[in-house]
Each structure stands twice: as C-alpha cells, then as structure tokens.
Image (spheres, rainbow, N blue to C red):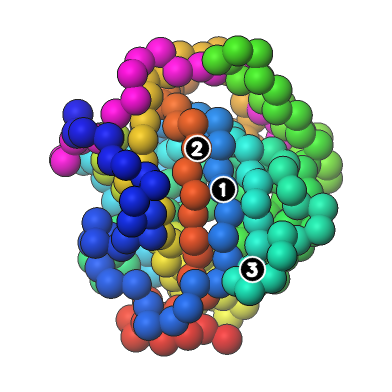
Amino acid sequence: MEELPNIQENKWDDSHRPWPLPNLPWGMKQTWSDLLFAHYPVKYEVLRKLVPESMELDTYEDVCWVGVVPFRMSGVRFRGLPPIPGTAEFPELNVRTYVTIDGKPGVYFFSLDADNWPAVKGARTFFHLPYHYAKMDIKNFGDTVLFESKRRNRSDIVFAGSYKPVSAPFIAVKGSFEEWMTERYCFYTLNASGLPVRCDILHHPWILQEAEGEITLNTTLSKQGIMVESDQPILHFSKKIDVRAWPLVHPATGRLHF
C-alpha cells in the first residue's frame, strides 16, 4: 500500500497518467461517490464475442474480468457552464471490462444505467455511450450503502445489494490487481460509424478500501450474455473521487472526433 496523497494540493496534476492528455481543454467535470467495484472473472472467449474486434481484451494474470460498479454521481457540468439542471445528484450503475488500443489501457462499457434522463440523453449524444434510463435508489446507513436498480424499458435487468468498506483507505500497489482495474485514464466506445474513439479522463489516483457486501439480485451480466466463472465477486470500495473528462478523440491520431 502506498502513502495517501494530499488531494487538496495539485488536484489536477496529470503526472501520474501513463500518457499525455490531449492538447484540448477538458470538457466535463463530475464527482463519483460511494462506489463499489464488484469484479467477476470471465472466460476470454465469452468476452471476445461481446467486445468490438477493434479493441484488444486486457487481462490480469491471463484472466479477463468484468466489473459491476454502483455509485452516486454529482456535480455534473460542462466546462464554463453551471451544473446541468436536474443533475445535482443521482445513482448510476456501470458494467465494464478492460481493453487496450495502441498500448493505452482503458475501460469498455457494456452498459451504464442512471436515474436521470438528461444525463442519459447527454451521454448518449456527446459520448456515444450505451446509457439507459433506470429506476434507482441509493441510501446510506452509517458505513453501509444500499443500492437498487431496475431498467425502465427492461424490467428484467436489475441489481440490488448492500456494501461497506472494511479496511483502512489505501492506494493500490504498482502491479496489483487493484491498480490494474482502477488506474485507467480513458474509456473507449464506438462512434456512429462503428469506429473506436477514446475519452481521456483525469483524476487523482484512486483511494480504495477493501469491502464486504451482499448482492441479492443481479441480472446485469447474464442479460447481456456475460457468463461469469464465479458468482463470488472481489469487492472494493471508494468513498469519493473528482473527475474531468476530455472530448472524444481518434485513438490513432489523438485528433478531436466530431
């Protein structure tokens, strides 16, 4: 475990990123809170059928992983503008795996569910992400977080569970699974033409905690054809992180995508 940083100093320092940010101004700012990382091992051949061929699957010790990530979103705003009306705070649930393009490791989202229609519409429009409108609830009872989600147009896609941190906060050790799954400073998606594009992001290194929880209902994987090798996930918690996102660029050239 590494020493925790003073996040009030050099908050937007990008020296820990593995490659330079695009030569563009950042476009969006947001805060993520009360995150659970629930990771499941998945066979390579299962994911290969589900992830675009233009993206190389990334593995940790030759194993593919899928993460289910419930959290609270807040403070969403575009650069130079006030917070987006109606998006002060809302729950979100992501299903993701890990890919690389041209040696740059990132995240690929199978789905992103949110209980906020403007956010869903905006992310679909500006970031080409597979967002879905869902009925959600997130509540805190001391250290325990209760989270429920049901997609509004697919009531069979549901998630329900509770989780809490059970260790002191830490920063992942270099080369560890925790570093591999969290320290990724971009996501990849496909544009309207089916070509890959990259969104670079910046945040402080993740401050994590080991977690325990009970996932009582979860069809977010099976209903998307993701068959996991174990129904007992590895759990981690993070209390809060501030994030900036850059406009989409072409992975090969780094040029702005329109």
Residue 2 against residue 52 in the figure, above or below: above
Name the residue at 56% across, 37% down: 33
Q: Where on the picture, by quarter, is residue 177?
A: top left
What's the amino acid at mark 2?
Lys
Element type at mark 1: strand
Residue 64 against residue 30 in the figure, above or below: above
The quarter in which the C terminus is drawn is bottom right
Q: Nearer the viewer, residue 246 or 96?
A: 246
Q: Give the overall secondary structure of the magenta segment.
A: loop
Q: Which label is found at residue 31?
A: 1
> What residue does disc 2 label?
240
What's the magenta region? 157-176
Q: Where on the picture, by quarter, is residue 255?
A: bottom left
**Callout 2: few (<14), some (14-19), or many (20+) C-alpha neighbours within 10 Å?**
some
Task: Determine if residue 43 is in view.
Answer: no
**Callout 1: few (<14), some (14-19), or many (20+) C-alpha neighbours within 10 Å?**
some
> What residue does disc 3 label?
78
- Quick check: is 207 in the magenta stretch? no
What is the distance, in whole Å, between disc 1 and disc 3 at their CAs?
13 Å
User: For this view, does 179 lie left or right of residue 250?
Assistant: left
**Callout 3: few (<14), some (14-19), or many (20+) C-alpha neighbours within 10 Å?**
some
